[in-house]
Amino acid sequence: DPKIIQKPKYLVAVTGSEKILICEQYLGHNAMYWYRQSAKKPLEFMFSYSYQKLMDNQTASSRFQPQSSKKNHLDLQITALKPDDSATYFCASSQGLGANTLYFGAGTRLSVL
Amino acid sequence: AQSVTQPDARVTVSEGASLQLRCKYSYSATPYLFWYVQYPRQGLQLLLKYYSGDPVVQGVNGFEAEFSKSNSSFHLRKASVHWSDSAVYFCAVSIGTGNYKYVFGAGTRLKVIA
């Protein structure tokens, strides 16, 4: 059974719309992350959270907003979608923010038309 | 600038042949080093990691990697590849205080042919 659940697996959106990507982890980890993978940038760090608190944000655009409603949830809201946002978005978690093993979900593949 | 370089974007090897995937990093201190694998339509999975000690570390599925401080490298090896090893392999480093951010290389796509 997958321990990190990302929903939906595939998402098609129109330019200018807003979408929320869901991530739940059942590993008991206290740190969660979002990464983005596209043809242009293979694996790009976006955010890290620890105990539901934002620790690091490497996303230049405020259109990307992580939301942590529960300890094991870290959703990603993307507003005013652009075609360049098309990518696979991976949620990951680890036990602590140290140099610990990252566990990844299967990803949400977003296509913006 | 801090970076992780995987110089080979694609590697093709025959089944049963040996494999080496290269990784070089550019950091002033010795980072924590990782290799992850990504199978089609899946997230990344840890193959092995190096923190300190013996420079040769063993991982899952017969993979091993060797750390070289003098060369700033962490190459991945396997003695005999199987068709199921076809995947994308990512080298990663984690360094710094506090947040310990991961930096990933661009990945090497491995294709194992019969």
Image (tube, coloured by chain):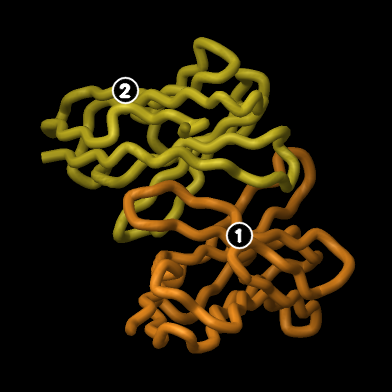
Q: Residues within 10 Å of mark 2 (few under 14, many from 20)?
A: some
Residue B91, image x, y percentages: 57, 65
Q: Which quarter of the rendered picture does the C terminus of chain A lie within?
A: top left
Residue A82, image x, y percentages: 20, 38
Residue at image point 63% right, 20% down: A53
Residue lying farthest to the top in this orientation: A69
In front of the other: A88 or A103: A103
Report the chain shown in orange. B
The total number of labels drawn is 2
* Circle 1 residue: B47
Residue B20, image x, y percentages: 56, 83
Depth check, mark 1 against mark 2: the one in front is 1
* Circle 2 residue: A20
Up/down of B90 relative to A69, above or below = below
Residue at image point 38% right, 51% down: A37
Residue at image point 75% right, 75% down: B67
In front of the other: B97 or B8: B8
Report the chain shown in yellow. A
**Element on which disc 2 rests:** strand
Residues tagged by mark 1 and mark 2 found on one chain of the structure = no
Residue B106, image x, y percentages: 46, 66
Seen in the image, is A24 located left or right of residue A26?
A: left
Q: Are marks 1 and 2 in contact (CB under 8 Å)?
A: no
* Dot 1 amino acid type: Leu
Disc 2 chain ID = A
In front of the other: A74 or B40: B40
Disc 1 chain ID = B
* Dot 2 amino acid type: Ile
